[in-house]
Image (cartoon, helix red, strand yellow):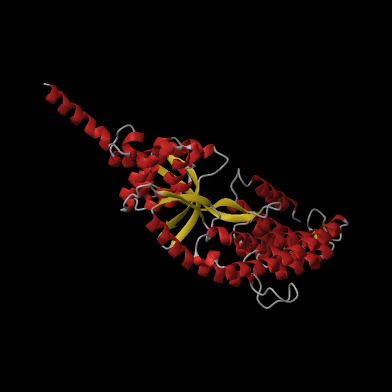
Amino acid sequence: MIRLISLITLCVAAPLLRAGLVESQCGGKAEDAVVKDFENGLPKMLEPRLADKSAIRLLLPIKKETYYCELSGVDGDTLTFSTLREAGVDSVSGKTLWGAMGPKHKLKPGELPPAGVAQWFDVPRCKPEIVVSLAAWLVSKKQPMIANAKLAEFSRTNTALKSEIDDWLCAKHGWTKPASGLTLTETHDFESALDGVLLLTPEAAAARLTELDKAAKQALKDLYTARGDGKGNFGTRKKTPTLPLETLRSRLSRYEKAFKGTTMGEAARIKMEITALTETVDADLKLIGENKLRAERLEMDEKFKEAGEIYEALLRGDPENMNLLMLAATAFYKGGGLKDSGNNCENPDNLKKAQGFYEGMLRRMPRMLSAMNYLGSIHQGLGAKDKAKGYFNEVLKLGDPEKDKANRDYATKCIANMK
C-alpha cells in the first residue's frame, strides 16, 4: 500500500518537475497553445493602445517594398496600418515629423513581422505571462535571438526564474547549459542606438563577437564615407558629409560601446582614428553653432536675407541637415516681404531663393504639407496663381481633416484670398 502511494505520488509529481518556463508562467498551458493564444489575442491587446500618445509603429515589408507604418485601426482579427511619410522637421529637436499619408495595409496577426511586434512590448511594464508568451511566439516565428533579448531583460528583475529561462533558451538555441548558467551580456545596436541584453553560453558569446568584429570593420568604413573631407575650409570641400553631422557625431560616440569586446572595438589604433574623426566633426559643429547664433541675431533685426545667406553657407558644409535647410528657407521666405494678403511681395529674389530650398525639402519629403503651403504662398506672391493653387489643392487632397487641420486651414484661406 505504501509502495502504491509512493508510485502515485511520483506520477503526480513528475509533470510538475517537467513543467518548464512556459507552463509555469502561463497557467500550465502547453507551449503550442500559448503561441496560438498570443497570436490570436494580439488585436485585443493592441486596440486600447490606439488612444495612446505613443503610437504603435513598425517597418512593414510587403513584396519588394518596405513601409514605415502606424497602427490606425483594429477590426476583429484584422489590423490596419497606415503608411507614414516624412512630413517635416521639428524646429527645436531637429527630429523628423511623420504623417499618415500613404496606403493602408490590412493584416492578420500571423502576417506581422516578428521584430516589429517585439518592439511594442516594454518588458518592465509587461506581466510575466505576456513576456514569456511573446518569447514563445517569437521562437515559433524562427526568431530565437529576439526572444532571447526579451527574456534576458526579463531575467534581470525576475532572478528566481533565471534557471528556468536558461533551460528554455538552451533548448531553443540548441545549446548545452553551462554549470553556472547563461551569462548576461549587454548589447548596443549601432544603427538604432538601442541598449539591450542577451543570455549566452561562452561559445555563443565568442561567436557573437566574431560577427560583431566584421560589422565593426564595415561600420568604420561607413563612418569615413559619411564624414567626407575633414580638412580644408568648411563649405568648400570636395567630399561633403553623407549624413547630418549631428547624426555622424552620435555614431562616432557610440562606436566603442556598440563593438565592445571585439578586436576592432578594443584596438588602440582604431580608438585613435575615431577620436581624430570626432574632433573634425566637433570643429564643424562648433562653427555651425556660432554662425547660427549670428544668423538668429540678424533675424531679430529683420535682416532676413543676410541670415538666409549664413544658413545657406552652413548647408554647403552640412548638406544633409534638414534643420539648416528649413532655417534657410524660412529666412529667405520672410525676406520676401509678402503683402496684399499674399498676392504681392517686396523682394521677389528672396522668394525665389526660398522656393529652391522648399523644393529641396519636397524632394526629400514628398508629402511635407507645410513645404507645399510655403511654395503655394511663394507662387502666389510672385503672381503665378495656377501654380499656387496647385500646391494648395495638393495640401487639401493629402492632408488629414483632423491631424493636418492647421495646414488645410492655411491652404483654404490662401485660396480664398487669391486675386
* Vertical order, 328 against 75 (above or below): below
Q: Quadrant of the N terminus?
A: top left
Residue in the picture at 52% in, 56% down: 189
* Residue at the far bottom in the pictured view: 238
The x and y percentages for residue 215 are 49, 66
Residue in the picture at 80% in, 62% down: 290
Q: Quadrant of the C terminus?
A: bottom right
The x and y percentages for residue 119 are 48, 47
* Vertical order, 181 against 61 (above or below): above
Using the image as rendered, state which of residue 388 and residue 136 is in the foreground: 136
Residue in the picture at 64% in, 73% down: 228
Using the image as rendered, state which of residue 234 and residue 398 is in the foreground: 234
* Residue at the far top in the pictured view: 1
Q: Quadrant of residue 361?
A: bottom right
Using the image as rendered, state which of residue 32 and residue 341 is in the foreground: 32
Q: Is residue 318 visible?
A: no
